[in-house]
Amino acid sequence: MATVSLQDIRKSFGKTDVIHGVDIDIADGEFIVIVGPSGCGKSTLLRMVAGLETVTSGEVRIGDRRVNEAEPMARDIAMVFQNYALYPHMSVFDNMAYGLKIAKTPKSEIEARVAQAAKMLQLEPYLQRKPRELSGGQRQRVAMGRAIVRKPAVFLFDEPLSNLDAKLRVQMRLEIKALQRELGVTALYVTHDQVEAMTLADRMVVMNGGVADQVGAPLEVYGNPQTTFVAGFIGSPP
Ligand code: ADP
Ligand code: MG
């Protein structure tokens, strides 16, 4: 587990400012969900925590470290993407082991960690299959397994369930929450699905055009929206 602290984060692409000074302090083991309409900067914010985008100004802290300049692999995070980002030519085992191999983890340790993750995710029968031989839900589990084996303190999710049908989304949502609790990791989860936000979040962040309009527990946000935008977005009267 680790705290994550974003302090006055700003981001510009060329002359276009897309994040205008976001402050969020995330507690150890907390589940934070970022919601907001398409284009409001959710992915960009997450990618700056991951180290996949540089921060134009402000500070990103994970635990007691300032990580603005740290490479993704050196940040104690793992990220799960919407499109899973699996290697099609590699087996499930190799997909899950890939990051550990890069980090020169001993083979026996890799095998132990992949076996443990496969057990947690019910992927044991599929370890030698290729991603194309799996269902959407199973592919999503492989992406989760690849994150779990690295034993990160912080899990980052960018709309991980968007490609799944409604029934599977509900099931995977429950699995993600159970895993987060079991592993005791801090989670930062992006979605545009409000039901997902309601059920997963300890606190939610409602973003609006590069600004965090409101940060609070779901019931607090729904019961007491702080701006007209938040009220409209979550569909409750201001
Ligand atoms: P969201 O995930 O909330 O849909 P994004 O973070 O993807 O939003 O995008 C926020 C804004 O930044 C959008 O206007 C998008 O076009 C812009 N943007 C994102 N990535 C880049 C990039 N690499 N270059 C230029 N503009 C970008
Ligand atoms: Mg996005």
Image: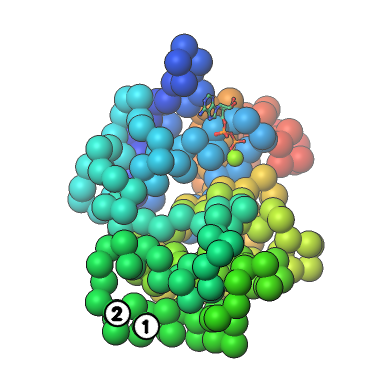
Residue drawn at (58%, 58%) of the image: 84
Q: Which residue is at the front of the view, 236 or 36?
A: 36
Above or below, comparing residue 108 to residue 19 in the picture? below
Q: Which residue is at the front of the view, 206 or 59?
A: 59
Residue denoted by label 1: 111
Residue 51 appearing in the image: yes
Above or below, comparing residue 234 to residue 197 in the picture? above
Q: Label 2 near label 1: C-beta < 8 Å? A: yes
Quarter of the figure with residue 106:
bottom left
Residue drawn at (54%, 38%) of the image: 42
Residue 138, image x, y percentages = 64, 72
Ligand 1 occupies quarter: top right
Q: Which residue is at the front of the view, 238 or 137?
A: 137
Residue 62, image x, y percentages = 29, 50
* Label annotation for residue 141: none
On screen, residue 20 versus residue 194, left or right, reads left
Q: Secondary structure at mark 1?
A: helix
Mark 1 is surrounded, within 10 Å at the Cα level, by few (under 14), some (14 to 19) or many (20 or more) other residues, namely: some
Above or below, comparing residue 71 to residue 18 in the picture? below
On screen, residue 12 versus residue 102, left or right, reads right
Residue denoted by label 2: 107
The type of residue carrying mark 1 is: Glu
Distance, label 1 to label 2, CA atoms, is 6 Å
The type of residue carrying mark 2 is: Lys
Q: Secondary structure at mark 2?
A: helix
Mark 2 is surrounded, within 10 Å at the Cα level, by few (under 14), some (14 to 19) or many (20 or more) other residues, namely: few
Quarter the N terminus occupies: bottom left
Residue drawn at (26%, 71%) of the image: 105
